[in-house]
Image: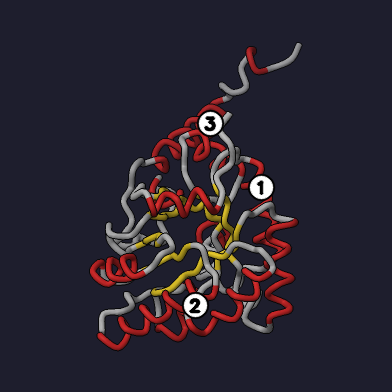
Amino acid sequence: MQKRKTVLDIQRMKAEGEKIAMLTAYDYPFARLMDMEGIDMVLVGDSVGPVVAGYDHTLPVTMEEMIYHCRAVSRGLGQAFLVADMPFLSYQVDLREARLNAGRLIKEGGAQAVKLEGGENVADVVRTLADMDIPVVGHIGLTPQSIHRMGGYKVQGKQDQQARQLLRDARAVQDAGAFAIVLEGIPAGLAGQITAALDIPTIGIGAGVACDGQVLVIHDILGLCEKYSPKFVKRYADAASLIRQGIKGYIDEVKQGVFPGPEHSFS
């Protein structure tokens, strides 16, 4: 039986030039399937809001929702490294709340690490969590919890000043103690520069191939999320058509009185 990956395994992958494959999941069945196929890292993202709960964005997601989904995903994993997002307002208010909420995701949710958005502005939070031995993944660039400031889901770092700030943000998060960092929605060239400048692994999403790894949402790669279709998503299967086919078959047989048949009934 393969043992559970750790922070050291993820860091070793960067050192040895092995790409890191990461997917976002929110429930036991998908987590189990990912783990069976050998995924390296699984993220329980606050993207559960728009993808699963139907919210317009990630901001309404609560700690209780994150703990619930994290606990479900953790039960499906045997070897993958599990990271949980810290939702909006769970770490921005003060350091005491940040420590408490991060600790809950580890203790109650079963996560091995937490992820939070921001750069220099959250370095103190990263540091205080790292100081209590909670592994932290940073997240810079297009940060969904900042959509109101950014004016929507827009690529970040196109201007020189923005690019320089993102490089400072990445270094600040690393220096504060993060063991990895997500680069989202930034030009591929800039992501390559950041990856080369850091000692910790970079995980890209809409940030080009030069990152040390990649992350996408499982519903996106299977064609199950029609609400959004970002440029950086590649669809690897059309599961929606198969599911709809199954649902239609069930409805038709119920309407026609075909299901349940004798083989599905008790005498």
SS assignment at label 2: loop
Q: Amino acid at mark 3?
A: Tyr
- The picture places residue 104, in percent across and down from the top left corner, at 73, 63
Of the residues under marks 2 and 1, which one precedes in the sequence?
1
Question: Badge 3 is on which residue?
Answer: 250
Question: Badge 2 is on which residue?
Answer: 118
> Alpha-carbon neighbours of circle 3 within 10 Å: few (<14), some, or many (≥20)?
some
Q: Residue extending furthest left?
A: 189
Numbered badge on residue 72? 1
Q: Nearer the viewer, residue 51 or 129?
A: 129
> Alpha-carbon neighbours of circle 2 within 10 Å: few (<14), some, or many (≥20)?
many
Q: CA distance from mark 3 to mark 2?
A: 47 Å
SS assignment at label 1: helix
Q: CA distance from mark 3 to mark 1?
A: 28 Å
Q: Amino acid at mark 1?
A: Ala
Q: Residue at x 47, y 83 (%)?
A: 148
- The picture places residue 254, in percent across and down from the top left corner, at 57, 29
Q: Residue at x 69, y 17 (%)?
A: 265
Of the residues under marks 3 and 1, which one precedes in the sequence?
1
Which of the colour schemes (rainbow, by chain, secondary structure, one colour) is used?
secondary structure
